[in-house]
Image (cartoon, grey):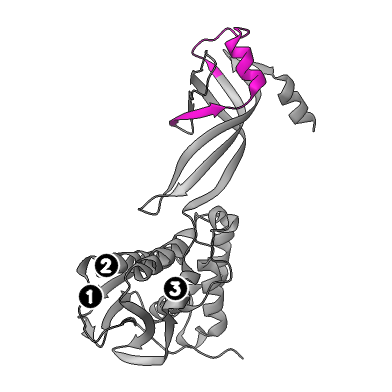
């Protein structure tokens, strides 16, 4: 039978310095705290739980930060605090790049996550229901959220850059009393938690409909413009046959041309944790419509038949 998890409502983070002083560079401290606070709120949002995080007065002994979590009930807070403690300290199995699964599970509103949260019934759990199995399932769910993994990576990037920190430890507390043993992470382990890049896997969108705004009529590596998903995008046209057809004047263009394409988009995470499109490439025009009349391209027909 899985062991019940003790109540907790605080997280204590202890920075250990290489010297005997207790001062902490204010900018570094604030940057670390920013990443952790964003992580805390991303955890709560992912789990569909409301939480307020209150900073407690820092303590000496290296430098000790304490955050108190306030929410609808103590059981939900215990779940959040216990899951965060594991995420911050347990060495990840896959740590160098965000996986496609994490990106695909970006939106907590998708049906898969709705079902997972419904099965966990976090808002209905009693104190005796909160055990190791429950927390393990919660951590697995959180690990699919790229924001949580990315925020953790950012935090460890900050502590790596600050050479005075040789170790950090974190511990759960309940009303300032320690719960269980603290979890230590030494400097030589920090890099295990850091993502190697903020770039995400390319996203291929099949049958992406683009309303053409301005094609490129001259040879050269110029960007086309179109209207896609309610946004104006600039994109490279890598369908050589379609590009040649435009440049050779084989199409009569007007302001009602729609392209049905295979669209490849490169993405990265910006400093606020949002996914940004860095490059769009049309690799194939499957068909195009002029004034609502559809024309399938030669390469598009081959694509549809394959």
**Mark 3, secondary structure of its residue:** helix
**Mark 2, secondary structure of its residue:** helix
Q: Which residue is mark 3?
A: 190
Quadrant location, the N terminus: bottom right
x and y percentages locating residue 201 in the rendered image: 56, 49
As displayed, is residue 230 above or below residue 132? above
x and y percentages locating residue 243 in the rendered image: 60, 18
Query: Is residue 293 at least partly visible in the picture?
Result: no
Q: Is residue 239 magenta?
A: yes
Q: Is residue 263 magenta?
A: no
**Mark 1, secondary structure of its residue:** loop
Q: Which residue is mark 1?
A: 24
Q: Residues within 10 Å of mark 3 (few under 14, many from 20)?
A: many
Q: Residue furthest right?
A: 305
Q: Out of 234 and 175, give the one closest to the viewer.
A: 234
User: Residues at badges 1 and 3 in contact (C-beta under 8 Å)?
Assistant: no
Q: Residues within 10 Å of mark 1 (few under 14, many from 20)?
A: some
Q: Which residue is mark 2?
A: 28
Residue 294 located left or right of residue 225 = right
As displayed, is residue 212 above or below residue 47? above
x and y percentages locating residue 169 in the rendered image: 38, 83
Residue at image location 52% in from the left, 34% down from the top: 280
User: Residues at badges 2 and 1 in contact (C-beta under 8 Å)?
Assistant: yes
- N-terminal of the pair, mark 2 or mark 3, is 2
């Amino acid at each position: 039978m899985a062991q019940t998890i003790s109540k907790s409502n605080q997280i204590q983070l202890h920075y250990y310095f290489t010297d005997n002083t207790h001062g902490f560079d204010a900018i570094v401290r604030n940057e670390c705290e920013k990443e952790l606070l964003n992580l805390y709120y991303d955890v709560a949002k992912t789990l569909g739980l409301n939480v307020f995080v209150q900073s407690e007065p820092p303590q000496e002994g290296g430098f000790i930060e304490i955050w108190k979590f306030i929410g609808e009930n103590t059981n939900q807070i215990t779940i959040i605090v216990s899951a965060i403690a594991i995420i911050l300290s347990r060495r990840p199995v896959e740590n160098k790049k965000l996986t496609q699964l994490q990106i695909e599970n970006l939106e907590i509103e998708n049906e898969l996550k709705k079902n997972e949260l419904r099965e966990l019934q976090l808002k209905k759990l009693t104190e005796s229901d909160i055990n190791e199995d429950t927390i393990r399932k919660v951590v697995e769910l959180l690990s699919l959220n790229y924001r949580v993994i990315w925020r953790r990576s950012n935090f460890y990037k900050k502590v790596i850059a600050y050479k005075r920190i040789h170790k950090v430890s974190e511990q759960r507390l309940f009303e300032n009393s320690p719960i269980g043993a603290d979890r230590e992470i030494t400097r030589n382990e920090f890099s295990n938690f850091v993502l190697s890049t903020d770039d995400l896997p390319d996203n291929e969108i099949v049958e992406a409909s683009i309303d053409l705004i301005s094609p490129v009529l001259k040879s050269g590596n110029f960007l086309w413009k179109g209207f896609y998903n309610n946004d104006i995008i600039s994109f490279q046209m890598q369908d050589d046959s379609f590009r040649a057809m435009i440049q050779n004047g084989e199409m009569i263009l007007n302001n009602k041309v729609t392209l049905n394409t295979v669209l490849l988009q490169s993405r990265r995470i910006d400093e606020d944790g949002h996914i940004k499109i860095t490059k769009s490439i049309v690799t194939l025009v499957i068909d195009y419509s002029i004034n609502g009349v559809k024309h399938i391209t030669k390469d598009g027909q081959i694509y549809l038949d394959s």
